[in-house]
Image: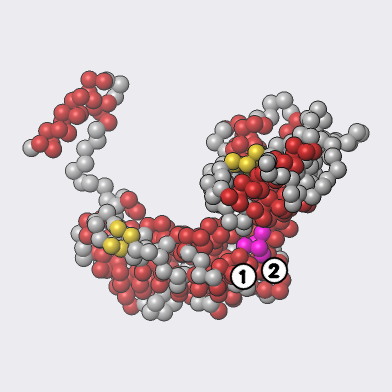
Amino acid sequence: MEKDTTTDVEEEEPLPSPVPGVEMLPPDIADKRFALTLETMKNDENYLWMELSKCRITDSRIRKLFAALKDNTSMTSIDLSNNVITDEGMSFLTGALAVGMVPNLLRINLQGNPISSKGRELLAGLYHLRKQLLVEYDMVEEPSEGESDLSVADDLQENFPRSKWIGNCTEANGPEDPEAQDLFSSAQRQRACDPHLLEEQAELLMQVLQQSATKSMSPAELASNLKQLGGVLTHLLEIHREKLPEWASADQLPKGLKEVVENIKTLTLMLDLPAAPHQSQRRTEEASAGLHRIAVVNVLGQLLGAGCPAIDGLLLIQAVPSRLIALFFQYPWNSMLQAALCKCFLAVLDRPGTLVCSAILAGGTGLPTLCAKVGSECATLVMSNRPGYAGYIVKLSKTLQVLGEKDASVNELLQQSDQWVIFAGVDGLLSKLVTEQTGHLGGPKPVLARSMAPFFQNNPGRSSAAFEQFRGLVLT
């Protein structure tokens, strides 16, 4: 006897197609396909593709679908095109995806649904939170008779590279097509930087992170949510860039930014979560910083560079500057972490005279003193034996030295460190490191290096000559 797959599916009146000329599936077939999809998701852990195009999917059914997808980690593609999902359904859908639901989803097709500009803004906001996710939807809303939509006028031009632009806007690194490059930045601001949407996303992500901290979520899972928070925070700070210097109290901050700032303690606690050690190229077991720490550093770095007195005060209360300095010297072989921290320090040093800049520079555990101490130790070692962060120490030390020559307040703090004065003096070891580290973070250029370029200048025969020379060097 055939199983009735229409159970638990609410009865709905036949709904018209939102796209002229597109016929939806008959109600009974649409209901059976919807019910079968729900049943399959419950029983098949490797369910990869969901095809529900023209199946009369409504806002209420979207909620049922994503309730069934709550713990799904295999789904890669969802087709919900040509249905009757409105802005309400899109709001629920984007909220679910924003907090990391269906983590391996690569594509979702929402074309042909009756959404307004608000719904499109919600979908555009997903670009910043799920950069690996391709979201397909109708970019242009049909204007009513006698009206014109100036905001999408460019979209209607014949030469607008619409297909490339849509695809590029959902790629992780932005558009690569030169023709779409200029359009990308302006359209990105117009469609994907809705302050209210970003504030809601920031609040939601912070709530998830707070719950994660109490549920012992793995560092890898934390890293995903922290990375999304960093993307939202970038755009929030950019939107309020002009007002940030005026806000002296946390009560003045917009709600999304306020939620993040008031939970700085939660973020700093995540720096204490250990990550599993890793095997280095030297075949030794090295302590691993973990992607979650790198993601936290990126978030805190944005707050440090915001230039907002209210944010600065809360960062200092949680001793964020000293925590980040200690973290930098804790993992000498983690270049990703060091790069993120170096970026933080440089952002703070761009704000000389502020309290956070003074906190970075002052005391025996300040950046100048520790750079002088570790830098002096590096200078006594040959290049091959120097720790991985040696190049970053040279970069930071040189930046401090130049900044001290330009800014009196910075120079005063530098002179309070005896170790720094000796290290950065005329005959100090910093000058030795700078001379040797001519390749900057890439290390020194070999003194006896010989370019191989002449052997390949439009002459195929010279490639064999170069190979023979290299072969002779190896065999002799």
Give the residue type at disc 1: Val
Specify whether residue 204 is painted magenta: yes
The answer to whether the residues at label 1 and label 2 have Cβ atoms under 8 Å apart is yes
Describe residue 376's horizontal placement relative to residue 8 as left or right.
left
Q: Position of residue 424 (x, y in %)?
A: 32, 68
What residue is disc 2 on?
253
Q: Position of residue 375 (x, y in %)?
A: 30, 66
Disc 2 packing (10 Å; few <14; some 14–19; many ≥20): some
Element at label 2: loop
Q: Which residues are magenta?
A: 201-205
Name the one closer to the observer, 240 or 363: 240
Describe residue 122's horizontal placement relative to residue 272 as left or right.
right
Q: Residue at x 86, y 43 (%)?
A: 13
Specify the label residue 312 is tagged with: none
Q: Residue at x 68, y 41 (%)?
A: 2
Name the one closer to the observer, 144 or 108: 108
Element at label 1: helix
What residue is disc 1 on?
261
